[in-house]
Image (tube, rainbow, N blue to C red):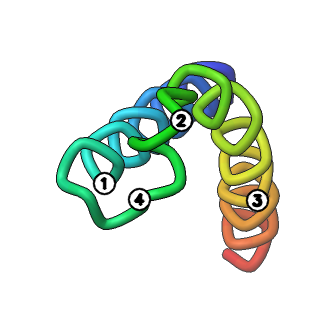
């Protein structure tokens, strides 16, 4: 479970950085807060993925 959380955190962080560098999220790239946004948003998305995975696993 810890590996899954870490993987989700890293993937979301990379996704946020990629979107900001591509200009899809101009707010982030204009202010240069990629690290801050990654540290704030990645745990939230990671927690959602972990909860989803936990309940999905219990169905079987």
Name the residue tied to disc 3.
Answer: 48
| Sequence-earlier tag: 2 or 4 | 4
Name the residue tied to disc 1.
Answer: 19
Disc 2 and disc 4: Cα gap in Å?
8 Å
Which of label 4 and label 3 is nearer to you? 4
User: Which type of secondary structure does the marked residue at label 3 adopt?
Assistant: helix
Tell me: 23 left or right of 29: left
Q: Residue at x 73, y 67 (%)?
A: 52
Disc 2 and disc 1: Cα gap in Å?
14 Å
Disc 4 and disc 1: Cα gap in Å?
9 Å
Q: Residue at x 66, y 57 (%)?
A: 49
Q: Quadrant of the N terminus?
A: top right
The circle on residue 26 is 4
Outermost residue to the bottom: 59
Q: Quadrant of residue 39?
A: top right
| Sequence-earlier tag: 2 or 1 | 1
User: Which type of secondary structure does the marked residue at label 1 adopt?
Assistant: helix
């Amino acid at each position: 479970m810890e590996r899954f959380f870490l993987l989700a955190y890293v993937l979301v962080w990379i996704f946020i950085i990629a979107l900001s560098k591509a200009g899809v999220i101009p707010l982030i790239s204009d202010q240069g807060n990629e690290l801050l946004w990654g540290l704030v948003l990645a745990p939230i998305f990671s927690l959602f993925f972990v909860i989803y995975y936990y309940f999905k696993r219990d169905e079987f």
